[in-house]
Amino acid sequence: MPGLNTTPLPEPQRGQLANGTTLVQLDLPNAPVVCLDFWCRAGSGMEGPDESGLAHFLEHMVFKGSRTLQAGEFDLRIEALGGNSNAATGFDDVHYHVLIPPGACGEALELLTDLVLQPRLDAKDFDMERQVVLEELAQSEDQPEEVAFQQLLKQSCLNHAYGLPILGAREALLDHTPEAMAAFHGRHYRADRCCLSVAGPLAALELDALLSNSALAGLKQSKRDVRPVPLHFEPGEERLELPRLEAARLLMAWPLPGAADQMSVVGGDLITTLLAEGRRSRLVERLREQLRLVESVDLDLNVLESGCLVLLEAVCEPEQLSAVRAEINAVLLALLQESPSEAEVDRARRLVGNGYRFSLEAPSAVAAMVGNSALWGREHNLQAPLDWLDEWDGRRLVQELVPQLQPQRAFVLEAVPA
């Protein structure tokens, strides 16, 4: 793949604080800002039977203040320093990040670690924020496309956390208390379950001194190691009628090995790109350009710790669902019977490789990438995924990945307007 990996990318510097908290740094001398990205293995997949939605609810409550910060004060102070912040909760983990000018890094680090690690969880704020989360859940349930997607995960992932909404169940959210949230926080926000990732111009920053005085240095170790539960995926099919759905949707899901198998993740990116990225990809060319059966067709790899999921969505008229499904099956079977050409694979390599390189241009994307990898114990150079791409050719894709994406291994959901 000439031109994609001629210049090696920098090596993240990994280490640990005295208490075992992971620290990963990437020096980007020409970046205009520093990204501080705090990661924790505290996604919705870590919730107990009575904790539905608690991980995401906690993400909301963190911004309602800490022992030293009033509600809203964190955002105001970060903005006054010329920065901005955000957070996200996933199935496996949660992260909070700040983009800040280098000169304000010390104060921003103190604010971020204090906010995340010592949340106040005030009872009045708790009740108010519960209503915000419930409204967010109601909006999700009011979107038929989201309802269809959630049903696909529920049926295919059975009782696994990946089949449950990250936002939680309404009944559980109504029952949650500040005490239960504090217990969840205390159980998961531990030294060995957290990682701080820092990317940007780091040469002038004295991170060791900054961290030694931060709340991060005071974290305790977990009493026991908690790992994601392996995903048990169940093929099958269902038809769902949904009010207000404007067009029919064919949704399909397949399982692939979890994120720990990084070679498989790269191969999954490659095969989904070959199938559905751009007009020349097999599914787009066949279904949209040649047969004009669909408005759109998308195929994405969702990288998850317990098991990755390949998710397909084809939007079409209800009467075309059977034809669309038949053509998708035919494309997948044809790929199994004859390896794609080297030119076809090379096009997919370039798209995946260029997309990866573009993501490395922003400190926030870099910090997220190396932070998530370090959180889960994956230590590889940023160059490695580009090198791994070269190890996949058409024959290997057909031998190792295409059989896992055959029709009989999928869960298929047909969503139609009611």
Image (tube, rainbow, N blue to C red):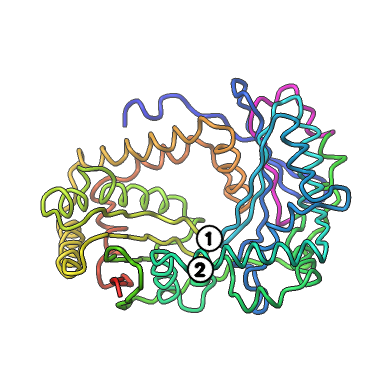
In the displayed structure image, the side of residue 5 where residue 202 appears, left or right: right
In the displayed structure image, the side of residue 287 where residue 106 appears, left or right: right
Name the spot of residue 330 as percent of width and height, x first. Answer: 15, 63
Which of pointers 1 and 2 indicates the residue nearer the eye?
Answer: 2
User: Does residue 237 show up?
Assistant: no
Going 44% across and 69% down the picture, which residue do you hit? 150
Residue type highlighted by circle 2: Tyr
Q: Is residue 114 above or below residue 240?
A: above
> Which corner quadrant holds the C terminus?
bottom left
Name the spot of residue 316 as percent of width and height, x first. Answer: 22, 61
Quarter of image, res 331: bottom left
Q: Is residue 239 above or below residue 252?
A: below
The Cα atoms of the two marked residues, 1 and 2, are separated by: 10 Å
In the displayed structure image, the side of residue 289 where residue 37 appears, left or right: right
Q: Are marks 1 and 2 in contact (CB under 8 Å)?
A: no
Q: Write down the region rendered in magenta.
A: 192-209
Residue type highlighted by circle 1: Glu
Q: Residue furthest front?
A: 244
Name the spot of residue 124 as percent of width and height, x first. Answer: 81, 64
- Residue 305: assigned label: 1
Q: Which residue is mark 2?
A: 162
User: Does residue 309 show up?
Assistant: yes
Badge 1, how many Cα within 10 Å: few under 14, some, many 20+?
Answer: many
Badge 2, how many Cα within 10 Å: few under 14, some, many 20+?
Answer: many
Q: Nearer the viewer, residue 391 or 205?
A: 205
- Residue 284: assigned label: none
Q: Nearer the viewer, residue 288 or 393?
A: 288
Q: Is residue 141 magenta?
A: no
Q: Quick one: SS at disc 2?
A: helix
Q: Is residue 69 above or below residue 13?
A: below
Name the spot of residue 350 as percent of width and height, x first. Answer: 32, 35
